[in-house]
Each structure stands twice: as structure tokens, then as C-alpha cells.
Amino acid sequence: MRPSVKPTRRVSAREFFWDLLTFDRLMTGPLVHLIYWAGLGILTIMAFGILGTTVGLALRGEDFSGVLLAVAVGVAGFLVIGALVLMWRAFCEFYVAIVRISDDLRALRQAADAEAAHQTRLHGQI
């Protein structure tokens, strides 16, 4: 089951510019998604490089040892690429978690300020 998605509201150009200047809202959340896909693209290019290396090794060898070396390089290379993909995903998820913690702390601070203002109004009326 998918978690509910908060509806996004339209932000005017002035509010967007003000957010860029004041750091009230962090822009890194959406930016991490672009960085994640760019990193996966780089890892895909590396995987194609490993594939090319294995084919080159297999074609270059005159006997069966070239094919065995190509298979070993291919398996080891794709295991390394798989580990790098998992590490890249973990790094990006960690970064998103840190950004969300910051957003949650800001919301808690705003709620505490609103509660303090409400308590001040109540004590002022008595």
C-alpha cells in the first residue's frame, strides 16, 4: 500500500525566490532525485564499459583462456556495479532522510511557537 501524498500547492515566483534566499524551505529533496538518476546513468555507462572489456578480452584471446578471463572479469565487474548501485541508493536515501528530519524539525518548531502564542493569549485573558 502506498503512503498518502500531500497535495502540492502552487507557489508564486515571489515565494519561490524568497525561499531560495532565506533557506526556509530546503530545495534539496527534489534535487536528490535528479542526482540519483544521474548517478545511475553513470553506473550504467560503467556497466557498458565492463561489457565492452569482457567482449574485447574474449575476442583478443587466441585460446580458451581469453574466454575464461573475460567471464571472470565480467562477473566480477557486474558484482562491483551491483554493489555500487546499492551503495548509491543507500547514500541518496540517507540524504533524503536528513532533509526530511530537517523539515520535520521545522514543522515541530512552528507548532511549538503557535502553542506558545496560544498559551500567552490564554494567560493574558485571565
Image (cartoon, rainbow, N blue to C red):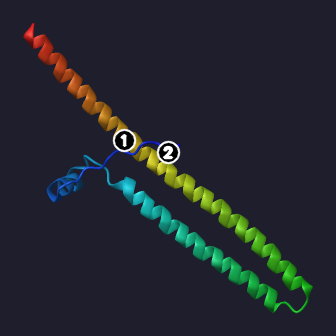
Looking at the rendered image, the disc whose residue lies closer to the viewer, 2 or 1, is: 2
Identity of the residue furthest to the left in this view: 125
Residue 8 x/y as whole percent? 30, 49
Residue drawn 22% across the image and 27% down it: 113
- What crowding class fits label 1: few (fewer than 14 Cα within 10 Å), some (14-19), or many (20 or more)? some
The kind of residue tagged 1 is: Ser
98 displayed left or right of 23: right
Residue 85 x/y as whole percent? 61, 61
Residue drawn 18% across the image and 17% down it: 119
Residue 109 x/y as whole percent? 28, 32
Q: Which residue is mark 2?
A: 2
Q: Nearer the viewer, residue 35 or 3?
A: 3
- Which secondary structure, mark 2? loop
The kind of residue tagged 2 is: Arg
Q: Which circle's residue, 2 or 1, is located before the other in the chain?
A: 2
Task: Point out which mark residue 102 bears.
Answer: 1
116 displayed left or right of 48: left
